[in-house]
Image: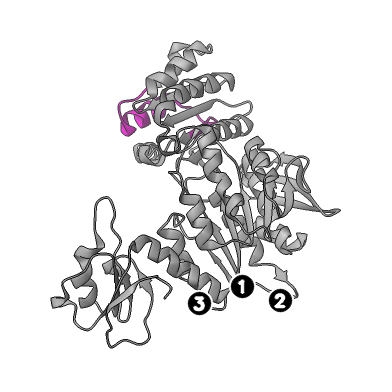
Amino acid sequence: MATDGKILREGKGVVFGDIVTGSGGVVKGSVFVALKGERFDGHDFLRDAVRRGAACLVVHKRPDFTHLKSATVIRVRDTLRALGNLAHYRRQLIAPKVLAITGSNGKTTTKEMVAAILERASIEGKSLRGKVLKTEGNFNNLVGLPLTLLRLQGKERVAVLELGTSRPGEIRRLTKIADPDIGLITSVAPAHLAGLSSLAGVAREKGELFRSMNPGGLAVVNLDDPWARRLGEGFKGAKITYGKRGEVRGESRKFLGVRGTEFTLRAGGERQLIRLRLSGEHNVANAVGAAAMAYGLGADLNAVRRGLEAVKPFPMRMALERWRGIGIINDSYNANPASMEAALKTLVEIGAGKEKIAILGDMLELGRESGRSHLKLGKRVARYRIDRLYLLGEQAQQVKEGVLLAGMKEEQVIVGKNHRDIARMVRSQTKRGAWLLFKGSRGMKMEMVLEALKEMGE
């Protein structure tokens, strides 16, 4: 049995439907897996799941059968592990080529780029159009990744999966479930330090992708990231490299303003001019990594070009717009030290010759490194010669201290009370032609400053 479980009661159902983990998603014939989370326990919803039509229940607690009608009940040692086992079974049964991407930054963008390329590619003479499964949203953890694989219907030839982590052991388990044919580590940077303790801890965790992959697979190695390069050296199987000195390279980058970035992609002795709709040096790196992954699978550079050029800016991820004569970079989806650095670089590049203003919220989940990381962030802001800085959050004073130590003037740094307070000050102090960067961790919701600013301008 795929779940390694025991049938406590065999119901009337012979063929089951979709596998779900929330009773609200149950339809007639569903298999309901009762997960136990920090704030809920799926076992409390068994009756509701059966009422909605669940034909099979996967549990790790012996249930009260009184209100479970004729549903099949399977008991397992751990329902979360059973969910992963079911997903692995489906992955082996359908047998698509699986491409797995992890990293501290850029994994979602890279995943979207790879999927866009493959939708326009042919492998072994057969088109992949409509045959590519990809991770949707943030379904990249021990629940989301199995649910993604369980969406496989049989027509898919490729699955492009994002692997996320916040504590040790998760990437290893995700890799075992997905059993990838090709793996990519985009970068290793301080992120989720509350669970992973240190940069070395992040590297160990991300490195589990290469360590747990089948040696018969292909590792895509970013030579421009020291940690990713080192992790790639430990992989025993075939490799394809990318970066400034990689087998796949991005050259002659040119900033196109709000229209994005232009660069030349080079691989296998061929070149393609790419007009990317995304801005920032880091997004060129993401594009080159995606190209290397797709190229490693067998996509030609024409498909790579068409796929990359089709990718549109993602909401709150380096999204550029102009509003009332002011340039806006909305990168408020999330933040860690490396992504802050990339965003500041982009602000300086885009805002060259203009007033450059950063509106920054705290970087969360940095554990004991939080204070030090925010102090360093302040020094970076000053180094980039940002004209004005607005700060929000518990670490705002740490950032301000770093800024002042690095030479910015007191009047250039403003700590706000809340989102609307900052929006009010930005509105009164910003002139046409300026460029604004909005960035912070997801919990800081820095997009609310932009929303309030626009409301005030109506």
Quick one: SS at disc 2?
strand
The amino acid type, in three-letter code, at marker 2 is Lys
Residue 337 percent across, percent down from the top left: 51, 31
Which-is-in-front pick, marks 1 and 2?
1
Q: Residue at x 58, y 45 (%)?
A: 207
Q: Given contact means CB atoms under 8 Å apart, are the residues at marks 1 and 2 in contact?
A: yes
Q: Quadrant of the N terminus?
A: bottom left
- Frontmost residue, 83 versus 338: 83
Residue lying at 43% horizontally and 35% vertically, measured from the top left: 440
Work out whether residue 158 can be spotted.
Answer: yes
Give the amino acid at mark 1: Arg
Which numbered tag is attached to residue 157? 1
Residue at 48% across, 38% down: 324
**Which amino acid lies under the numbered mark 3 shown in the image of this protein?**
Gln
Q: Is residue 325 visible?
A: no
| Residue behind mark 2 | 126
Indicate the position of residue 48 as horizontal and vertical percent values: 20, 71
* Left-right relation of 400 to 121: left
Q: Position of residue 397 (x, y in %)?
A: 38, 19
Q: Nearer the viewer, residue 19 or 252?
A: 19
Q: Secondary structure at mark 3?
A: loop
**Marks 1/2: CA–CA distance:** 10 Å
Q: Residue at x 58, y 57 (%)?
A: 100
How far apart are the alpha carbons under marks 3 and 2? 18 Å
> Considering only order in the chain, which callout, 2 or 3, is on the residue closer to the N terminus?
2
Q: Is residue 421 magenta?
A: yes
Provide the residue designation for mark 3: 153
Alpha carbon distance from label 3 to label 1: 10 Å
User: SS of the residue at dot 1?
Assistant: loop
Residue bounds of the magenta highlight: 415-437
